[in-house]
Protein backbone atom coordinates (compact mmCIF):
# COMPACT_ATOMS: atom_id res chain seq x y z
CA UNK A 1 0.00 0.00 0.00
CA UNK A 2 2.98 2.25 -0.77
CA UNK A 3 3.61 4.38 -3.86
CA UNK A 4 6.67 6.37 -4.91
CA UNK A 5 10.40 6.58 -4.21
CA UNK A 6 11.55 10.16 -3.49
CA UNK A 7 8.01 11.14 -2.57
CA UNK A 8 6.22 8.20 -0.99
CA UNK A 9 2.61 7.73 0.06
CA UNK A 10 1.49 4.88 2.31
CA UNK A 11 -2.25 4.27 2.67
CA UNK A 12 -3.94 3.01 5.82
CA UNK A 13 -7.40 2.40 7.24
CA UNK A 14 -10.55 0.45 6.40
CA UNK A 15 -13.87 1.41 4.84
CA UNK A 16 -15.82 0.81 8.06
CA UNK A 17 -13.03 1.39 10.55
CA UNK A 18 -12.57 4.62 12.46
CA UNK A 19 -10.65 6.39 9.73
CA UNK A 20 -8.64 6.27 6.50
CA UNK A 21 -5.61 8.28 5.54
CA UNK A 22 -2.09 8.48 4.19
CA UNK A 23 1.48 8.97 5.36
CA UNK A 24 3.49 11.23 3.04
CA UNK A 25 7.28 11.09 3.20
CA UNK A 26 9.73 13.16 1.19
CA UNK A 27 7.68 16.36 1.06
CA UNK A 28 10.26 19.18 0.78
CA UNK A 29 10.49 21.54 3.76
CA UNK A 30 9.04 24.96 3.07
CA UNK A 31 6.26 23.73 0.79
CA UNK A 32 3.21 25.86 1.52
CA UNK A 33 0.22 23.77 2.60
CA UNK A 34 -3.07 25.11 1.22
CA UNK A 35 -5.87 23.54 3.26
CA UNK A 36 -8.49 25.31 1.13
CA UNK A 37 -7.19 23.56 -1.99
CA UNK A 38 -7.20 20.23 -0.15
CA UNK A 39 -10.87 20.75 0.80
CA UNK A 40 -11.74 21.69 -2.78
CA UNK A 41 -10.09 18.56 -4.18
CA UNK A 42 -11.87 16.40 -1.59
CA UNK A 43 -15.21 17.80 -2.74
CA UNK A 44 -14.56 16.46 -6.25
CA UNK A 45 -14.43 12.81 -5.05
CA UNK A 46 -17.25 12.87 -2.51
CA UNK A 47 -19.94 10.32 -3.29
CA UNK A 48 -23.59 11.27 -3.42
CA UNK A 49 -26.04 12.50 -6.02
CA UNK A 50 -27.87 10.45 -8.65
CA UNK A 51 -24.80 8.74 -10.10
CA UNK A 52 -23.03 7.60 -6.94
CA UNK A 53 -23.36 5.92 -3.57
CA UNK A 54 -25.58 7.58 -0.97
CA UNK A 55 -22.87 7.21 1.68
CA UNK A 56 -22.32 10.76 2.89
CA UNK A 57 -18.93 11.50 4.44
CA UNK A 58 -17.79 15.08 5.08
CA UNK A 59 -14.18 14.08 4.23
CA UNK A 60 -12.55 16.60 6.54
CA UNK A 61 -8.76 16.17 6.32
CA UNK A 62 -6.76 16.38 9.54
CA UNK A 63 -3.02 17.08 9.22
CA UNK A 64 -1.43 15.59 12.33
CA UNK A 65 2.33 15.82 11.74
CA UNK A 66 4.90 17.43 9.47
CA UNK A 67 3.13 20.80 9.08
CA UNK A 68 3.86 23.93 11.12
CA UNK A 69 2.31 27.36 10.60
CA UNK A 70 1.13 26.44 7.12
CA UNK A 71 4.38 24.98 5.77
CA UNK A 72 5.84 21.48 5.45
CA UNK A 73 8.65 20.89 7.95
CA UNK A 74 10.38 18.16 5.92
CA UNK A 75 9.19 15.48 8.34
CA UNK A 76 6.60 12.81 7.42
CA UNK A 77 3.09 14.20 7.06
CA UNK A 78 0.33 12.08 8.57
CA UNK A 79 -3.15 12.93 7.31
CA UNK A 80 -6.39 11.26 8.31
CA UNK A 81 -10.06 11.38 7.33
CA UNK A 82 -12.57 10.02 9.82
CA UNK A 83 -15.37 7.66 8.73
CA UNK A 84 -18.71 8.97 9.99
CA UNK A 85 -21.37 7.31 7.78
CA UNK A 86 -20.49 3.62 7.61
CA UNK A 87 -23.28 1.04 7.91
CA UNK A 88 -21.68 -2.28 8.80
CA UNK A 89 -24.99 -4.16 9.19
CA UNK A 90 -25.25 -4.23 5.38
CA UNK A 91 -22.34 -6.72 5.38
CA UNK A 92 -23.62 -9.28 7.88
CA UNK A 93 -23.51 -12.02 5.20
CA UNK A 94 -19.70 -12.01 4.98
CA UNK A 95 -17.34 -13.84 5.33
CA UNK A 96 -19.60 -16.88 4.78
CA UNK A 97 -21.20 -15.63 1.57
CA UNK A 98 -18.46 -13.81 -0.40
CA UNK A 99 -19.59 -11.34 -3.04
CA UNK A 100 -18.92 -12.03 -6.73
CA UNK A 101 -16.25 -9.74 -8.15
CA UNK A 102 -14.97 -8.70 -4.71
CA UNK A 103 -11.90 -9.53 -2.66
CA UNK A 104 -13.89 -10.98 0.29
CA UNK A 105 -12.87 -14.61 -0.18
CA UNK A 106 -9.29 -13.90 -1.26
CA UNK A 107 -8.56 -11.43 1.53
CA UNK A 108 -10.01 -13.86 4.06
CA UNK A 109 -7.63 -16.55 2.80
CA UNK A 110 -4.66 -14.17 2.76
CA UNK A 111 -5.28 -12.98 6.33
CA UNK A 112 -5.98 -16.42 7.75
CA UNK A 113 -9.53 -15.36 8.54
CA UNK A 114 -8.75 -12.12 10.37
CA UNK A 115 -9.50 -9.50 7.69
CA UNK A 116 -12.00 -6.70 8.20
CA UNK A 117 -14.22 -7.22 5.15
CA UNK A 118 -16.93 -4.65 5.93
CA UNK A 119 -17.44 -2.41 2.92
CA UNK A 120 -14.36 -3.86 1.26
CA UNK A 121 -12.09 -3.23 4.25
CA UNK A 122 -8.61 -2.03 3.28
CA UNK A 123 -9.33 -2.73 -0.41
CA UNK A 124 -12.27 -0.32 -0.51
CA UNK A 125 -12.42 2.72 -2.75
CA UNK A 126 -12.99 4.62 0.49
CA UNK A 127 -9.20 4.68 0.83
CA UNK A 128 -8.96 6.87 -2.27
CA UNK A 129 -9.89 9.75 0.05
CA UNK A 130 -6.34 9.60 1.39
CA UNK A 131 -4.93 9.56 -2.15
CA UNK A 132 -6.85 12.67 -3.18
CA UNK A 133 -5.87 14.51 0.00
CA UNK A 134 -2.19 13.59 -0.37
CA UNK A 135 -2.11 14.71 -4.00
CA UNK A 136 -3.78 18.02 -3.19
CA UNK A 137 -1.14 18.68 -0.54
CA UNK A 138 1.84 18.23 -2.89
CA UNK A 139 0.21 19.72 -6.00
CA UNK A 140 2.37 22.89 -5.99
CA UNK A 141 5.40 20.70 -6.82
CA UNK A 142 3.96 20.33 -10.34
CA UNK A 143 4.79 23.91 -11.23
CA UNK A 144 3.40 24.66 -14.71
CA UNK A 145 2.45 21.05 -15.44
CA UNK A 146 -1.27 20.78 -16.23
CA UNK A 147 -3.37 17.69 -15.51
CA UNK A 148 -6.89 17.35 -16.90
CA UNK A 149 -9.26 14.40 -16.56
CA UNK A 150 -12.86 13.58 -17.40
CA UNK A 151 -15.17 10.64 -18.07
CA UNK A 152 -14.36 9.58 -21.61
CA UNK A 153 -16.98 6.84 -21.84
CA UNK A 154 -19.87 5.26 -19.96
CA UNK A 155 -20.90 1.93 -21.40
CA UNK A 156 -21.05 2.30 -25.20
CA UNK A 157 -21.32 6.10 -25.11
CA UNK A 158 -18.08 7.87 -26.07
CA UNK A 159 -17.24 11.46 -25.22
CA UNK A 160 -15.02 13.70 -27.30
CA UNK A 161 -11.32 13.91 -26.34
CA UNK A 162 -10.56 16.32 -23.50
CA UNK A 163 -8.79 18.83 -25.73
CA UNK A 164 -11.84 18.96 -28.03
CA UNK A 165 -14.23 19.74 -25.14
CA UNK A 166 -15.04 23.05 -23.45
CA UNK A 167 -12.88 24.03 -20.49
CA UNK A 168 -14.52 23.08 -17.22
CA UNK A 169 -18.05 21.76 -16.78
CA UNK A 170 -20.45 23.25 -19.33
CA UNK A 171 -23.54 22.54 -17.23
CA UNK A 172 -24.69 20.82 -14.03
CA UNK A 173 -25.05 17.40 -15.65
CA UNK A 174 -21.50 17.63 -17.04
CA UNK A 175 -20.28 18.32 -13.51
CA UNK A 176 -22.31 15.47 -11.99
CA UNK A 177 -21.00 12.98 -14.54
CA UNK A 178 -17.53 14.59 -14.59
CA UNK A 179 -17.72 14.66 -18.40
CA UNK A 180 -16.73 17.80 -20.31
CA UNK A 181 -18.59 16.86 -23.49
CA UNK A 182 -22.07 18.45 -23.23
CA UNK A 183 -23.22 16.63 -26.37
CA UNK A 184 -23.26 13.16 -24.75
CA UNK A 185 -24.11 13.64 -21.07
CA UNK A 186 -27.88 13.28 -21.53
CA UNK A 187 -27.34 9.93 -23.26
CA UNK A 188 -24.92 8.89 -20.51
CA UNK A 189 -27.51 9.81 -17.88
CA UNK A 190 -30.20 7.76 -19.62
CA UNK A 191 -27.87 4.76 -19.86
CA UNK A 192 -26.97 4.85 -16.15
CA UNK A 193 -30.62 5.35 -15.16
CA UNK A 194 -31.73 2.37 -17.24
CA UNK A 195 -28.96 0.16 -15.85
CA UNK A 196 -29.83 1.13 -12.29
CA UNK A 197 -33.49 0.26 -12.81
CA UNK A 198 -32.30 -3.21 -13.80
CA UNK A 199 -30.45 -3.43 -10.44
CA UNK A 200 -27.23 -3.60 -12.40
CA UNK A 201 -24.12 -1.50 -13.06
CA UNK A 202 -22.09 -0.34 -16.04
CA UNK A 203 -18.46 0.06 -17.06
CA UNK A 204 -16.78 3.38 -17.78
CA UNK A 205 -13.50 5.04 -18.74
CA UNK A 206 -11.54 8.01 -17.46
CA UNK A 207 -9.34 9.96 -19.87
CA UNK A 208 -6.31 11.93 -18.65
CA UNK A 209 -4.38 14.66 -20.47
CA UNK A 210 -0.99 15.87 -19.17
CA UNK A 211 0.51 19.00 -20.76
CA UNK A 212 3.47 21.33 -20.13
CA UNK A 213 5.59 18.48 -18.76
CA UNK A 214 9.29 19.29 -19.30
CA UNK A 215 11.34 16.93 -21.45
CA UNK A 216 13.35 14.24 -19.70
CA UNK A 217 11.08 13.53 -16.70
CA UNK A 218 11.05 9.82 -15.87
CA UNK A 219 13.42 6.86 -15.70
CA UNK A 220 14.49 4.15 -18.15
CA UNK A 221 12.75 0.80 -17.94
CA UNK A 222 10.66 -0.13 -14.90
CA UNK A 223 10.29 3.34 -13.36
CA UNK A 224 9.62 5.11 -16.65
CA UNK A 225 6.94 7.76 -16.92
CA UNK A 226 4.29 5.48 -18.43
CA UNK A 227 5.19 2.39 -16.34
CA UNK A 228 4.97 4.49 -13.17
CA UNK A 229 1.65 6.02 -14.19
CA UNK A 230 0.38 2.63 -15.32
CA UNK A 231 1.13 1.06 -11.95
CA UNK A 232 -0.69 3.87 -10.17
CA UNK A 233 -3.69 3.78 -12.51
CA UNK A 234 -4.00 -0.02 -12.31
CA UNK A 235 -4.17 0.23 -8.53
CA UNK A 236 -7.34 2.33 -8.72
CA UNK A 237 -10.15 0.03 -7.54
CA UNK A 238 -11.92 -1.65 -10.50
CA UNK A 239 -9.34 -0.58 -13.10
CA UNK A 240 -9.08 -3.28 -15.78
CA UNK A 241 -6.82 -1.65 -18.34
CA UNK A 242 -4.69 1.38 -19.24
CA UNK A 243 -3.65 2.71 -22.65
CA UNK A 244 -1.24 5.53 -23.49
CA UNK A 245 -1.07 7.60 -26.64
CA UNK A 246 -2.45 5.69 -29.60
CA UNK A 247 -2.75 2.62 -27.37
CA UNK A 248 -3.98 -0.53 -29.04
CA UNK A 249 -4.53 1.35 -32.30
CA UNK A 250 -0.76 0.96 -32.75
CA UNK A 251 -1.25 -2.76 -33.46
CA UNK A 252 -2.68 -1.99 -36.90
CA UNK A 253 -0.32 0.87 -37.73
CA UNK A 254 2.96 0.93 -39.65
CA UNK A 255 6.12 2.57 -38.40
CA UNK A 256 5.65 5.47 -40.79
CA UNK A 257 2.13 6.01 -39.48
CA UNK A 258 3.10 5.82 -35.83
CA UNK A 259 6.38 7.73 -35.85
CA UNK A 260 6.39 11.44 -35.07
CA UNK A 261 9.30 13.32 -36.71
CA UNK A 262 11.22 15.83 -34.64
CA UNK A 263 10.66 19.44 -35.55
CA UNK A 264 10.86 22.73 -33.74
CA UNK A 265 14.35 24.14 -33.28
CA UNK A 266 17.76 23.16 -31.95
CA UNK A 267 16.97 25.04 -28.77
CA UNK A 268 13.45 23.59 -28.44
CA UNK A 269 12.95 20.35 -30.40
CA UNK A 270 9.33 19.14 -30.51
CA UNK A 271 7.58 16.21 -32.13
CA UNK A 272 5.29 16.84 -35.08
CA UNK A 273 2.29 14.98 -36.44
CA UNK A 274 -0.98 13.62 -35.08
CA UNK A 275 -0.97 12.80 -31.35
CA UNK A 276 2.77 12.30 -30.85
CA UNK A 277 3.76 10.18 -27.86
CA UNK A 278 4.09 12.09 -24.60
CA UNK A 279 6.68 9.59 -23.41
CA UNK A 280 9.46 7.77 -25.24
CA UNK A 281 11.54 5.05 -23.54
CA UNK A 282 10.25 6.11 -20.13
CA UNK A 283 11.05 9.83 -20.51
CA UNK A 284 8.69 12.73 -21.16
CA UNK A 285 9.00 13.98 -24.73
CA UNK A 286 7.57 17.48 -24.33
CA UNK A 287 4.36 16.51 -26.15
CA UNK A 288 1.02 16.08 -24.41
CA UNK A 289 0.61 12.70 -22.74
CA UNK A 290 -2.78 11.01 -23.14
CA UNK A 291 -3.97 8.09 -20.99
CA UNK A 292 -7.19 6.08 -20.94
CA UNK A 293 -8.22 4.14 -17.83
CA UNK A 294 -10.85 1.41 -18.22
CA UNK A 295 -13.04 0.67 -15.20
CA UNK A 296 -15.16 -2.44 -14.80
CA UNK A 297 -18.83 -2.23 -13.77
CA UNK A 298 -19.12 -1.99 -9.97
CA UNK A 299 -19.33 -5.51 -8.53
CA UNK A 300 -21.84 -4.66 -5.79
CA UNK A 301 -25.24 -4.77 -7.49
CA UNK A 302 -28.75 -5.20 -6.14
CA UNK A 303 -29.58 -7.94 -8.66
CA UNK A 304 -29.78 -11.44 -7.18
CA UNK A 305 -26.72 -13.60 -7.90
CA UNK A 306 -26.17 -17.26 -7.08
CA UNK A 307 -22.79 -17.83 -5.46
CA UNK A 308 -20.99 -20.10 -3.01
CA UNK A 309 -21.93 -20.06 0.68
CA UNK A 310 -18.88 -21.21 2.64
CA UNK A 311 -20.98 -22.22 5.66
CA UNK A 312 -22.30 -25.35 3.94
CA UNK A 313 -20.49 -25.39 0.59
CA UNK A 314 -23.70 -24.81 -1.39
CA UNK A 315 -24.42 -22.15 -4.02
CA UNK A 316 -27.18 -19.85 -2.78
CA UNK A 317 -28.87 -16.63 -3.90
CA UNK A 318 -27.23 -13.43 -2.70
CA UNK A 319 -28.51 -9.86 -2.88
CA UNK A 320 -25.84 -7.32 -1.96
CA UNK A 321 -27.28 -4.64 0.28
CA UNK A 322 -25.75 -1.26 1.02
CA UNK A 323 -25.13 1.96 -0.87
CA UNK A 324 -23.15 1.45 -4.04
CA UNK A 325 -22.21 3.31 -7.23
CA UNK A 326 -23.93 2.24 -10.49
CA UNK A 327 -20.89 3.56 -12.41
CA UNK A 328 -17.37 4.38 -11.21
CA UNK A 329 -16.07 6.84 -13.80
CA UNK A 330 -17.50 10.04 -12.29
CA UNK A 331 -15.90 9.42 -8.90
CA UNK A 332 -12.69 8.01 -10.38
CA UNK A 333 -11.88 11.23 -12.24
CA UNK A 334 -10.54 12.89 -9.09
CA UNK A 335 -8.64 9.71 -8.17
CA UNK A 336 -6.99 9.47 -11.60
CA UNK A 337 -5.97 13.10 -11.38
CA UNK A 338 -4.57 12.52 -7.88
CA UNK A 339 -2.61 9.43 -8.94
CA UNK A 340 -1.15 11.41 -11.84
CA UNK A 341 -0.13 14.22 -9.49
CA UNK A 342 1.60 11.89 -7.03
CA UNK A 343 3.54 10.02 -9.72
CA UNK A 344 4.66 13.19 -11.50
CA UNK A 345 5.70 14.89 -8.26
CA UNK A 346 7.75 11.82 -7.33
CA UNK A 347 9.47 11.71 -10.74
CA UNK A 348 10.13 15.47 -10.68
CA UNK A 349 11.79 15.14 -7.26
CA UNK A 350 13.77 12.11 -8.43
CA UNK A 351 15.17 14.11 -11.36
CA UNK A 352 16.05 16.95 -8.99
CA UNK A 353 17.79 14.54 -6.60
CA UNK A 354 19.77 13.01 -9.48
CA UNK A 355 21.25 16.33 -10.62
Image (spheres, rainbow, N blue to C red):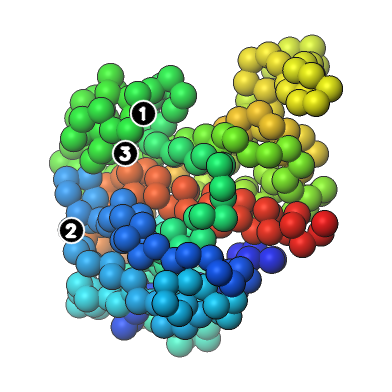
Closer to the camera in the image, 203 or 171: 171
Residue at 24% in and 50% down: 52
- Discs 2/3, front: 3
Residue located at (80% from left, 39% from top): 281
Residue toward you, 182 or 310? 182
Residue that carries the numbered disc 3 in the rendered image? 178
Residue 202 drawn above or below residue 23: above
Mark 2–mark 3 CB contact (< 8 Å): no
Q: Quadrant of residue 243?
A: top right
Identify the secondary structure beneath mark 3.
loop
Residue 2 in which image quadrant: bottom right
User: In this figure, which residue is indicated by the disc labeled 2?
Assistant: 54
Quarter of the view holding residue 92 = bottom left
Give the Cα distance between marks 2 and 1.
29 Å
Q: Give x and y (percent) for residue 166.
A: 35, 24
Identify the element where label 2 is drawn.
Answer: loop
Q: Indicate which disc, 2 or 1, sits on the residue closer to the N terminus.
A: 2
Q: Nearer the viewer, mark 1 or mark 3?
A: 1
Residue 30 x %, y %: 55, 69
Say which label, 1 or 3, has the lower sequence index: 1
Judge the density around disc 2: few (<14), some (14-19), many (≥20) Cα neighbours within 10 Å. some
Q: Between tags 2 and 1, which lies in front?
A: 1
Please determine whether, in this image, residue 270 is positioned above or below residue 138.
above
Q: Which residue is mark 1?
A: 167
Q: How many neighbours does mark 1 have within 10 angstroms: few (below 14), some (14-19), or many (20 or more)?
A: few
Please give left or right for residue 108 compared with residue 159 in the image: right
Point 84% across, 22% down: residue: 266
Relative vertical location of residue 285 with respect to residue 143 in this rendering, above or below: above
Amino acid sequence: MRLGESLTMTLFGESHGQLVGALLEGVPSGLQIDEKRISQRMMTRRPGGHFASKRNEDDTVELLTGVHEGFATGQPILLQIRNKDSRSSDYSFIPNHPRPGHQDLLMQIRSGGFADLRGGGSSSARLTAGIVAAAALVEPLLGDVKIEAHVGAIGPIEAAPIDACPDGWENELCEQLRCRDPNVVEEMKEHVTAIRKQKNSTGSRVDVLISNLPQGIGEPWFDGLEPALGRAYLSIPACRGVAFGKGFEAVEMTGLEHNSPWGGSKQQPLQEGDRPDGSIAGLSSGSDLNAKIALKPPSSIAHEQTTLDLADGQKKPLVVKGRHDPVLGPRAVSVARAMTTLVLCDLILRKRDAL
